[in-house]
Image (cartoon, rainbow, N blue to C red):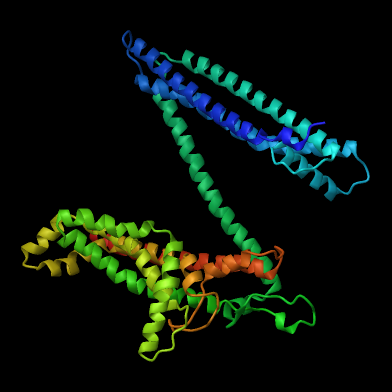
């Protein structure tokens, strides 16, 4: 009877076989490319080809790689499902008197043991089934290897036979790339539709429990439910206005920091800085975008928040240990590169003829920037600000560490507040049921945030369209 130690290492072997098979397919496809190109080059010396030799090589390589890799991915996805059904049927035939949940638990134990996870179980039936499943996995893996390699060689032989002077290989390659682009765009669109539909579906489930008027117009956010009927203190409040007001407050503080600094930096780099200054100063500024947000959060919680509190106390203000001001200031520093880099690019892209025409009628450099360059680059600047606002609205770590988790309805940046994204994270962690109103509230918050972001995008597109027609 095999024990759990004899079954270890299977997962590593399966992953190694998968990696080696992919490497083999890539090598075979590369070989097909060279074979097709060499054969087409030979024909080119005798007759005029419809397509260049490299297109014949691309045609063979693509037709060899795409079907075989697709087969590997489909096989890998379906194998656990089919083997799990076989294991379940095997366990049901070998044992009786067990509930369906017991069979599910035994199936998972067999699956883990066959994958190399040593559970220490001594049940002979589980060990025997795990050994049987491991043999099935090995047979399946080797079958996949043989079928894939045979298919690859058959495709290479077939596509190589199509290399001829009149064969339109370039059209075939373009058709493959067009199909790939179509599939990619379809996946992106379907993913977006799926996300929106899931948000809508779960939000409707939430509104079946909590009235929509309470959620949209309530002034108190306390996402809890009573465990017992007599537990009055456990009754929750689902008014989302404090959550969204905290989001807007922190985003406003962040934009007050990032907007002027980012735009002025972009104007300086594009209009005033020398090429040498621009060459080393702009990359240093863009490093801010690569710093992890958790680092910003630690800096805000351990350094800036105490400084803001001590400074406020020094001038007689009541500043809490965690405040919207501290989180907004650090968040503003974080999103400066988004505004600076994008605005710099669009300002630099303004035609030099507009500048020359402004200088020719006697305008100064500052007047040219205010009256000509900024209006001409306004669509791109609006896009940069929109991206920065979206980044500020979606930030979680800095708010959780520097602003707190309390949903306070206040316009005072010296108090602690919370944001939509933080409350979504709080709602989705823990061991509560998925049908719990607290969990479902995350989808309602996400849907409202999605609608707000969509409105911002529509407004920004309207502004871009208006000024682009004017300055194009």
Residue sticking out furthest to the bottom: 316
Q: Is residue 166 visible?
A: yes
Residue sitting at x 28%, y 64%: 378
At which x and y percent is residue 252? 40, 75
Query: In this view of the protein, which residue sits in the foreground, 2 or 259?
Result: 2
Image quadrant where one finds the N terminus: top right
Q: Give residue 449's position: percent from left, percent from top.
A: 52, 67
The location of residue 49, given as percent across then percent down, is 35, 16
Using the image, determine if residue 113 lies above or below residue 165. below
Please identify the quarter of the rendering in which residue 22 is found.
top right
- Residue drawn 74% across the image and 84% down it: 232
172 over 281 or under it: above or below: above
Question: Which part of the image, by quadrant, shows the C terminus?
Answer: bottom left
Residue 41 rendering spot, x and y as whole percentages: 34, 14
Left or right: 59 as drawn, with respect to 367: right
Is residue 168 visible in the rendered structure shown here?
no
In front of the other: 20 or 315: 315
In the image: residue 74, left or right of residue 355: right
Above or below 210: residue 278: above
Task: Choose between 431 and 125: the one closer to the eye.
Answer: 125
Residue at 71% x, 83% y is: 233
Q: Quadrant of residue 293?
A: bottom left
- Residue sitting farthest toward the right: 97
Q: Is residue 145 left or right of residue 292?
A: right
Q: Is 48 rendered above or below residue 371?
A: above
Give the number of callouts: 0
């Amino acid at each position: 009877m095999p024990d759990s130690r004899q079954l270890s290492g299977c997962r590593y072997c399966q992953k190694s076989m998968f990696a080696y098979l992919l490497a083999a397919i890539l090598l075979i496809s590369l070989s097909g490319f060279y074979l097709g190109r060499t054969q087409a080059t030979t024909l080119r010396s005798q007759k005029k080809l419809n397509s260049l030799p490299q297109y014949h090589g691309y045609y063979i390589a693509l037709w060899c790689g795409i079907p075989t890799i697709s087969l590997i991915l489909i096989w890998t996805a379906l194998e656990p499902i089919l083997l799990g059904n076989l294991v379940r049927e095997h366990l049901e035939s070998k044992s009786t008197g067990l509930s369906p949940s017991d069979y599910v638990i035994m199936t998972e134990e067999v699956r883990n043991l066959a994958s190399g996870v040593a559970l220490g179980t001594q049940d002979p039936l589980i060990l025997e089934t795990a050994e049987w499943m491991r043999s099935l996995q090995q047979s399946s893996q080797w079958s996949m290897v043989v079928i894939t390699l045979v298919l690859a060689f058959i495709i290479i032989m077939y596509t190589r036979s199509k290399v001829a002077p009149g064969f339109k290989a370039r059209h075939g390659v373009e058709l493959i790339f067009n199909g790939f682009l179509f599939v990619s765009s379809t996946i992106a669109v379907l993913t977006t539709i799926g996300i929106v539909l899931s948000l809508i579906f779960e939000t409707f489930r939430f509104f079946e429990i909590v009235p929509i008027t309470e959620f949209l117009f309530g002034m108190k956010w306390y996402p809890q439910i009573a465990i017992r009927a007599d537990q009055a203190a456990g009754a929750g409040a689902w008014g989302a206005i404090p959550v969204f007001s905290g989001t807007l407050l922190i985003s406003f503080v962040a934009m007050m920091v990032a907007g002027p600094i980012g735009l002025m930096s972009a104007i300086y780099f594009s209009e005033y800085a020398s090429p040498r200054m621009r060459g080393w100063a702009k990359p240093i500024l863009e490093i801010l975008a690569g710093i992890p947000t958790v680092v910003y959060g630690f800096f805000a919680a351990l350094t800036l928040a105490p400084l803001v509190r001590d400074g406020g106390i020094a001038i007689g203000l009541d500043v809490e240990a965690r405040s919207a001001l501290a989180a907004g200031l650090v968040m503003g520093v974080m999103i400066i590169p988004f505004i600076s880099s994008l605005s710099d690019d669009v300002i630099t892209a303004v035609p030099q003829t507009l500048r020359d025409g402004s200088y020719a009628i006697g305008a100064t450099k500052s007047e040219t920037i205010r009256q000509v360059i900024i209006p001409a680059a306004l669509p791109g600047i609006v896009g940069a600000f929109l991206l920065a606002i979206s980044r500020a609205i979606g930030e979680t770590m800095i708010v959780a560490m520097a602003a707190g988790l309390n949903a306070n309805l206040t316009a005072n940046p010296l108090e602690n507040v919370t944001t939509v994204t933080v409350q979504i994270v709080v709602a989705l962690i823990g061991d509560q049921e998925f049908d719990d109103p607290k969990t479902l509230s995350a989808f309602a918050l996400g849907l409202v945030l999605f609608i707000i972001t969509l409105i911002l995008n529509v407004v920004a597109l309207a502004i871009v369209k208006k000024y682009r027609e004017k300055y194009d």
